[in-house]
Amino acid sequence: MFQKILIANRGEIALRVLRACKELGIQTVVVHSTADADAMHVRLADESVCIGPPPSRDSYLNIHQIVAACEITGADAVHPGYGFLSENAKFADILAAHNITFIGPTGDHIRIMGDKIEAKRTAKRLGIPVVPGSDGAVTEEKEAKRIAAEIGYPVIIKASAGGGGRGMKVARSEADLVVALQTARSEAGSAFGDDAVYIEKYLQKPRHIEVQVFGDGVGHGVHFGERDCSLQRRHQKVWEEAPSPALNAEERAHIGGVCARAIADLGYSGAGTIEFLYENGEFYFIEMNTRLQVEHPVTEAITGIDLVHEQIRVASGAGLSVRQEDIRFQGHAIECRINAEDARTFTPSPGTITHFHTPGGLGIRVDSGVYSGYKIPPYYDSLIGKLIVHGRNRVECMMRLRRALDEFVVDGIKTTLPLFRDLVGNADIANGEYDIHWLEKYLAKED
Ligand code: ADP
């Protein structure tokens, strides 16, 4: 097992990983920017190294500084959290070259899944259902028209190098398509330095359902069920739950099995999430994330398994602590992402938190890196905490969530808590009846 892990992240996820290391008796090193000198992860770590000024590119994305911090402190592994360098294949390769373990998959697996065309091709080869569309990149107008006519309008044009919900264009007719193809290619070229785009069927009212998988790198794969992340604003997840209100046990076992087998065949190592759009009983692969996800706690709540422990075990070569038949699903869990943002306009609200009181009681978990008196720096994303609630069933989970939201106090800044207080009282949400467009429509009506 590792002696010392360096955590190359900040905020709630740095603290999340730190807790797992402490439980496993592993020494911790955290890195931080000058803006984060007072952060909770810095206070609680065994050692900390300041790696640069506030902008991420000079600190949390500065590979040389992070490798130097490993060398200075003698860390034998790095946990990248999510975001920042977590899906940077070069970072994984550089660490490997320095004999430092990257707690995640190989650089090659990150590379395959980071290129959407290659990812889709690989998924298809592994027997994962994909969205009908072009086989690879499309450059010619004629070819685009032929494919679109074949799969039927509307279609969506996506940049192979796209991410974070950027680089997509919907075309509803052949006239649309010609313009969309041109703009998508030139925008992808300037935004990502790669103008490869591909075409697929645009699904009208899908849900976003993702499967949590793990591989041990030597041919075993398991799944930890799915999460429903359909409640999104601008392609950013807002509320996540497990299990999905839309799936039955048979569908769950089927798609989980398909994903676990694919991970085993790929020889994948560590945590991964296979994301699907789900419509009319069918799953359509959209992408795979090769890291821990923000919403992993809902899976932990319904399985009782610490996914960061598993990541560390697998990276150390100790293998997974569970086989598929050991993974059992109990009850229902919901996560609300609490952002330092105005709940109506979603404009960021950095500043000092004058009072921070978190809810407690049975079934409540709060993952957060902030505290009363903490000043939120303006440089990073606005997530200040996650409220995760577990109940024996969805009804109990919702009752508990409503109570927990009432108890939550964050003074001094604006947060998205009021949005969640509205959502728990909504009939569609109570019935689990929503697709990926529901939240945007709801917010537009409220204005
Ligand atoms: P990114 O890597 O930028 O997040 P994704 O491929 O995961 O891109 O897609 C992001 C979002 O775009 C999806 O969650 C969905 O809302 C929408 N989307 C992507 N592909 C399709 C499609 N074929 N039909 C309908 N919506 C889509």
Image (tube, rainbow, N blue to C red):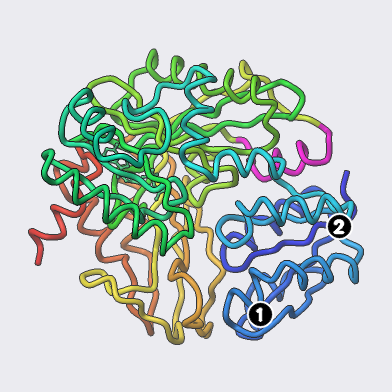
Q: Quadrant of ligand 1?
A: top left
| Residue at position x 71%, y 51% in the image | 20
Q: Please name the predominant secondary structure of the magenta segment in the image.
A: helix
The residue nearer to you, when weighing 387 against 319, is 319
Which picture quadrant has residue 280?
top left
Which residue lies under the disc numbered 1? 33
Q: Is the residue marked 1 within 8 Å of ligand 1, measured from its CB?
A: no
Nearer to the camera, 391 or 384 = 384
Q: Nearer the viewer, residue 170 or 271?
A: 170
Check the image and report above or below for 103 versus 64. Answer: above
Q: Point out the stretch of residues depicted in magenta.
A: 305-318
Decide: few, some or many residues near mark 1? Use Cα within 10 Å; few <14, some 14-19, many ≥20: some
Q: Using the rendered image of the protein, determine whether residue 373 is visible from the camera's viewpoint.
A: yes
For mark 2, what is the residue?
A: 4
Q: What element does badge 2 sit on?
A: strand
Q: Is residue 22 visible?
A: no
Res. 53 mark:
none
Measured as percent of width and height from the top left, residue 442 is found at: 14, 54
